[in-house]
Image (tube, grey):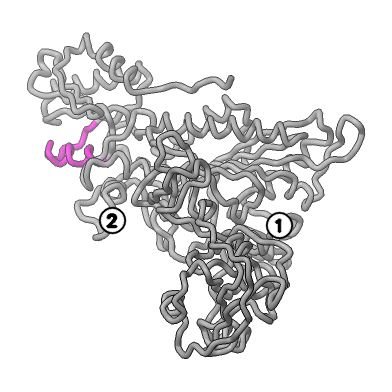
Amino acid sequence: MKTRNLLFKTKKNVPNGLSKGQAVLEKGGFFYQTDVLGVYSDMPFGLLFMQNIEKIIDEELETSGFSKVALATLQSRQLWERSGRWEKYNATNTMYTATDGRGNEYALAPTAEESAFQLMEFSATSYNDLPILIQQTSTKYRNEIRPRGLTRGRAFKMNDAYSSHATLHELIHTFDYTLKAYNRIFERIGLPVIEVEADSGAIGGEGSTEVVHISPLGDDTILNCNDANCSYAANVEKANAVISKPRSTNYQKSYREVHTPNIKSVDQLCCHFDLDPIQMIKTVIFEVTGCPSMPFVAACIRGDLEINPTKLSNVVGALEVNPASEEDIKNLTGADVGFAGPINLELPVFFDESCRDLNDFLCGCNHTDYHAINVNFGAVLKIPESFFNLLMATDGMHCPSCSDGILESNVAIELGHCFQLGQGYSQQMGFTVIDECGKAIHPYLGCYGIGVSRVAAVAAEYFAHSDKKMVLPLSIAPYQVAIIPVNTKDQVQVELASTVEKYMLTMKLSCLLEDRTISFGKRIADHDLFGSPIRIIAGKLADQNIVEVHNLLIDHIEKVHLDDLPDVINSIVEQSLTVPTPLN
C-alpha cells in the first residue's frame, strides 16, 4: 500500500488529558470520533489494527474447536423475554431498543447470549449434536452513561464465543481450555495478563474468570496475594478475605436503647461507648434495580467492615443495588440517617457472615438519636435463616486461599471474561435436547468474550513509547514494514524502495510504501505514530543497493545490502512472531 492511496489524517495536537496511547491513536488518525459520543468510525489504520487482533482470536479459537458464525444484531423483544432479561436490561437503561412501523419491539444487541442459544437450539435436538462451540466478532451497542474512548464505548467491537454441552464436566473442560486459548491470544498480541476470579454480573452463571491487564486505563480493582507461593487473585467485586474473629463471651447483658444525640458514625460510637467496631453491626439501606418484589433492602455487617454492593445484588437477585437516598431512608426506617438498624425493620434484611458469632453487640434501632446495646440473636433479634458473604475485601486483609499472605490491590482493565453459565439460560429459555436415555435435558452453557476495541486501546497504551511514538508487535501492527525513501524526488531511492516493497510482499509481510513529497522529518514523525515495527530507509547508499533496516522492537539499526535483506528481515520476524499452539 502506498501512503498517497491510504485515507488518513495525522494531527499535531490533541485534547489535553489523553494518555500516551490514546494520544497516539488520535494523532495517527486510527479512529474518527463521530457526532455520537462513544461511537467511532474505523479509519484504515484502526481497521487493520483491529482486524489483526481479530485474526489472532479467530486462529486460536478455531484451534480450540470453535466454528465462526455471524449472529443477528437486531433481536426481538420476545427472544429477550424468553431469557428473562428484557425488563432487567431496560431497567438499567443500558440497552438500545427500536420499534418498527407495526409496533414490534427490538433490541440492538448489547450482548449475544439470546441469539447464540437460539441458534444452538435450532442446531441441536440430541446429546449426539453436542457439544456446539461457536464464536463471532461483531459490533455491540450499550448506552454507556459516561463513555470513555475505545475502552468503554457505546458501540464497540467484541468477540464472543458460546458453548453447549450435555454434561457439567464437558462445560468445565471447555471453560478451562478456552481460558488457555485466551492466554495464548494475549501472548501473541504481546500483552501480559493475569486470570482473576470475577463476578458474573448481568450475564449470570456460577464460575466466572476475568483475564485482565494491569493498566492505569482500567476501572477495575484487583486484589492478589503477596505470597509468592499463592496464586490467589480476584476482582474486588468477587474477592474474599480472612477477617479476625470477634471476642466470644459466655454471658448476655440486658438489652437497652441509649440516647446518642448526633452520634452516627462508627468512629463516633466507638468513642462514645468505648467499644471496638468489631462489637457493632452497621445497617445500610439499599435501593434495588431489577427486582420489583424488593425495591429496597437492608444489609448488615460488622462495624469494622464494608458491604460489597455487587455481592449484595447477587444475593438479592437484582441487576444492581445503590445506597438509598436520605429521604427514602427516613421513610423506610422512621429515623434520620445514621440510626437504621435491623430491630423491627420492615424490610428484607441480609446479614453478612461476620455477624454470625456476635453477641452483646451495638446497632441502630430505627429511632433518631438512639442506639441499641447488648443486642443478641435469639433475643431481641430473630436468628437469621441464613448469613451471606457480603464482605468488601480490601488490601491489607489476609488472603482467603493461604491465610498467611496479605491482599494487595492493583488497577486493571478487563480484556476477556469466561463464564460457566450452567443450565440457567437453557432452563429459562426452554432449550432442551434428548439424552442417551431418551429424556429431555437442559444443556450446560458457556459464554466467553474478548473486547476487541478495548484490546486495541490497551495495546496502544502498552506499546506507546510516548504520545508521539508507538511500536506495535509484528502480530498486530497495521503494517509490519514501513519503506521510506529519504528523498522522494531521487529516482534511485524511489526505485530501490519499490524493489524492497516487492521483496516484502514476496515474504508475505504487509508493508506501507511512503510516496508523499512532504519533508522527510514530517514523514518520519507520521510513521512514528503508525506503529510499524520494521522501518526500511532508502537513502544516500541507494545507488549501491544498500538500505538502513530499523528494528524498532529492539531499537537496532543496520545497513543491509538488498541481496541480504530477506535473511535479515526473516531473522527479525522469527525472533518476534509466535504461532498458534495446537490444543492438546
The quarter in which the C terminus is drawn is top right
Left or right relative to 7: residue 69? right
Specify the amino acid type for callout 2: Leu
Left or right relative to 278: residue 436? right
Please state which of residues 374 and 448 is positioned toward the viewer in this rendering: 374
Judging by the rendered image, the residue that carries numbered circle 2 is 18
Judging by the rendered image, the residue that carries numbered circle 1 is 80
Q: Quadrant of residue 506?
A: top left
Q: Of the residues under marks 2 and 1, which one precedes in the sequence?
A: 2
Q: Quadrant of residue 355?
A: bottom right
Q: Which residues are magenta?
A: 514-529
Residue 48 showing in the rendered view:
no
**Residue farthest toward the top in the current orientation of the protein:** 563
| Dot 2: element | loop
What residue appears at the point 19 percent right and 22 percent down from the top-left corner? 549
What residue appears at the point 44 percent right and 76 percent down from the top-left corner? 274
